[in-house]
Image (tube, rainbow, N blue to C red):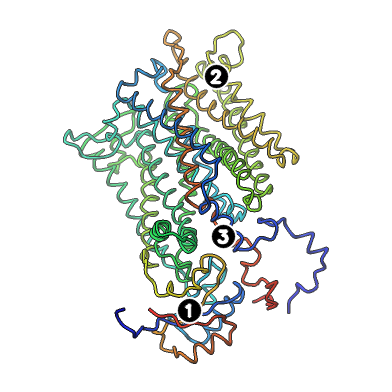
């Protein structure tokens, strides 16, 4: 009945893939080793890291309070550069917030089982990045207490927002994205919170996890709806994640500004977001893997290799988009477009104020990831980390180039103006890194950073037709 | 404390692996039981069929949520921008004849709210269908059950099932390979 008996060991070896979880770890190994990150005593390095990130976060919050209480004048914005670091940082962070949902949704729908090891941490990272992103549009309006004007609330003035404006679409897109990402993340967490609940010894911990796990019992009548919910959320999040950065790009693309007025912006922004997001996932997970050695069996070099390939692919798409922008500017014969894309970037006569930023972006985003063509570079974690740092910087420069370069030198040369950030802007940006990293450290410490129940599914023993090794109950292929 | 008479919730058995639980479920299904369940630390592929369960109708709830979101976005945008507070800006018409709204400009928010309401319906529907949150359940009284979220595989037949019989059900569970067969009280 079963054909499997005729397969020789050589044939088997030829088709066997490298397992997603190394060293033949069992389900109980995963439970105890991932839960231990939450359950054990807070490690020393955690305090060291938190003592660095939390003051930075607090100083960032101080800068925000200072800006709100004093006014946007504490920033370096001017005419014509009305958007500068604020929106650059917003787009930077929201872009980073794309990898998590991409991993949890698109890679789920495409049945990329390797996603299970990294999706929880990446989703958490997404949420924290969107938190950081959300700060900037809020505070850049100047009068922060008027920020509710963004929402369609019928007021005593009977003023409604302009529903035809991409800026309002952005409000809906980002808030929907954040809400749906939180729901998706929490849905995934419930079975793992139940695991922590069942392992908890002390009263407070038990109470905390019991409350959060909602009474999850892992019954198949529950899993049935749960799996459907997960599939639906993945299906909803897939177009959503693609739409968010498309809508962000509409903020620029629907204007007439040379450098912004580009139809390729939506796909180009989405590719860039995935590119930057994966770089940030690796930036965070590589040190985490070093600190918690048990993660090395779950987040393997195979995972790093695959993420590096995605970085290479999306980086090349971004590079293609950069070249296509140049082509369209040339092909359009529009003198303003040609000035923005060629004259200010390629002429060495000092006419382009931010030529250096453009070439930083090109080097970091297009040239640096090309080393990932080589397997030796993808498997060398130090190389991977360094390249990811280039990508992180490059993606920030990309948004700076798009926003500031275009605004500083647009149609009328008499209107041109340099822009310099003030210490408030610089520290607000550094502060968001503090917020982001502090939140991530808290997440690592208090919630399971690996989706245990999902990683268990990719173990061979999870297959109901798998022959059990130890019990000796050999079960044949079932039809 | 209150009473010595405990109601029997059901009989529970442990199985050594996902495969063993899968085959046990097929047998319990074939016996004709209705009120029973299996518990595992992760969803087991094909278990719905092994238990004789159909497709989850959560998707229907989500569809209703999505349509509500779509309609909400449509009216939220159309009513203010064409009747309450006409904003005629950047060349986008209020009246795109013959319909009194500008669909292209309204599409992004219609999409976003469709997704948002669908996601709410999905989570709400999931909680309702699974009857969560439910912090007390009789099965938690069984001390072995804490393994259900670690590496344990369990099958529980409830006492309210018409085919339930304390002795015969226990015997059947042992025959199909159940370990630690235990009477669980409410």
Q: Observer-nearest residue: A31 or A315? A: A31
On the image, the x and y values in percent for residue A195 come to: 49, 61
Label 1: chain letter: B
Question: Is residue A71 shown to the viewer in this render?
Answer: yes
Q: Nearer the viewer, mark 1 or mark 2?
A: 1
In the depicted structure, whether residue A404 falls above or below residue B129: above
Question: Is residue A123 shown to the viewer in this render?
Answer: no
On the image, the x and y values in percent for residue A417 come to: 44, 11
Q: Quadrant of residue A457?
A: bottom right
Q: Name the residue located 57 percent from the left edge and 81 percent from the top edge.
A: B178
Which residue lies under the disc numbered 1?
B156
Q: Nearer the viewer, mark 3 or mark 1?
A: 3
Which residue lies under the disc numbered 3?
A31
Q: Name the residue located 42 percent from the left edge and 74 percent from the top edge.
A: B141
Label 2: chain letter: A
Which residue lies under the disc numbered 2?
A333
Spatial separation of the CA atoms under disc 3 and disc 1: 23 Å
Quadrant assignment for the N terminus of chain A: bottom right
Mark found first going from the N terminus, 3 or 2: 3
Q: Observer-nearest residue: A82 or A338? A: A82
Spatial separation of the CA atoms under disc 1 and disc 2: 74 Å
On the image, the x and y values in percent for residue B86 come to: 23, 34
Question: How many numbered discs sit on the rendered protein?
Answer: 3
């Amino acid at each position: 009945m079963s054909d499997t008996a005729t397969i020789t060991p050589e044939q088997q070896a030829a088709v066997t893939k490298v397992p997603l979880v190394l060293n033949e770890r069992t389900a109980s190994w995963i439970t105890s080793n991932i839960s231990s990150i939450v359950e054990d005593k807070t490690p020393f390095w955690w305090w060291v890291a938190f003592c660095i990130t939390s003051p930075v976060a607090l100083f960032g919050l101080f800068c925000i309070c200072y800006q709100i209480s004093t006014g946007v004048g504490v920033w370096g914005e001017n005419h014509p550069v009305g958007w500068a670091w604020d929106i650059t940082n917003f787009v930077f962070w929201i872009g980073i917030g794309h990898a998590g949902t991409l991993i949890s949704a698109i890679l789920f729908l495409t049945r990329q089982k390797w996603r299970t090891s990294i999706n929880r941490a990446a989703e958490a990272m997404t949420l924290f990045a969107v938190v950081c992103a959300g700060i900037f549009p809020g505070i850049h309006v100047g009068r922060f207490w008027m920020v509710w004007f963004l929402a369609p609330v019928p007021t005593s003035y009977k003023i409604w927002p302009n529903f035809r404006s991409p800026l309002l679409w952005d409000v809906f897109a980002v808030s929907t994205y954040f809400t749906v990402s939180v729901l998706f993340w929490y849905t995934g967490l419930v079975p793992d919170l139940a695991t922590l609940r069942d392992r908890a010894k002390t009263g407070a911990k038990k109470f905390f996890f019991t409350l959060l796990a909602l009474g999850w019992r892992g019954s198949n009548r529950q899993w049935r709806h749960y799996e459907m919910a997960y599939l639906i959320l993945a299906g909803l999040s897939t177009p959503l994640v693609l739409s968010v950065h498309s809508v962000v790009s509409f903020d620029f693309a629907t204007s007439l500004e040379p450098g912004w007025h580009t139809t390729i912006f939506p796909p180009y922004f989405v590719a860039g977001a995935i590119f930057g997001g994966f770089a940030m996932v690796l930036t965070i997970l590589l040190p985490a893997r070093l600190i918690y050695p048990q993660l090395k069996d779950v987040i393997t070099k195979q995972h790093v290799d695959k993420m590096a390939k995605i970085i290479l692919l999306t980086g090349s798409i971004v590079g293609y988009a950069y070249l296509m922008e140049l082509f369209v500017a040339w092909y359009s014969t529009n003198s303003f477009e040609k000035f923005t894309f060629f004259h200010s970037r390629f002429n060495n006569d000092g006419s382009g104020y931010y030529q250096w930023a453009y070439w930083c972006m090109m080097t970091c985003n297009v040239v640096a990831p090309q080393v990932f063509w080589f397997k030796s570079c993808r498997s060398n974690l130090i190389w991977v980390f360094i390249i990811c740092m280039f990508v992180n910087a490059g993606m920030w420069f990309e948004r700076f180039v798009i926003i500031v370069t275009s605004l500083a030198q647009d149609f009328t040369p008499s209107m041109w103006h340099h822009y310099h950030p003030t210490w408030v802007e610089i520290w607000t940006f550094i502060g968001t890194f503090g917020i982001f990293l502090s939140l991530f450290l808290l997440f690592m410490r208090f919630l399971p950073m690996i989706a245990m129940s999902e990683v268990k599914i990719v173990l061979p023993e999870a297959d109901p037709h798998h022959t059990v090794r130890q019990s000796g109950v050999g079960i044949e292929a079932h039809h | 404390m209150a009473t010595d008479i405990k109601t029997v919730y059901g009989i529970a058995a442990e199985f050594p692996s996902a495969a063993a639980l899968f085959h046990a479920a097929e047998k319990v299904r074939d016996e004709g039981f209705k009120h029973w369940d299996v518990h595992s630390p992760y969803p087991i592929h094909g278990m719905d069929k092994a238990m004789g369960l159909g497709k989850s109708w959560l998707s229907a709830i989500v569809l209703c949520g999505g349509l509500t979101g779509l309609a909400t976005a449509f009216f939220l945008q159309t009513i203010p921008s064409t009747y309450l507070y006409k904003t005629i800006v950047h060349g986008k018409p209020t009246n795109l004849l013959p319909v009194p709204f500008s669909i292209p400009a309204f599409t992004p928010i219609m999409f976003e709210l469709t997704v948002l309401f669908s996601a709410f319906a999905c989570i709400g529907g999931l909680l309702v269908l699974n009857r969560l949150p439910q912090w007390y359940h009789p099965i938690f009284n069984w001390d072995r059950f804490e393994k259900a979220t670690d590496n344990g595989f369990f099958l529980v037949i409830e006492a309210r099932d018409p085919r339930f019989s304390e002795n015969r059900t226990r015997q059947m569970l042992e025959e199909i390979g159940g370990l630690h067969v235990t009477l669980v009280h409410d």
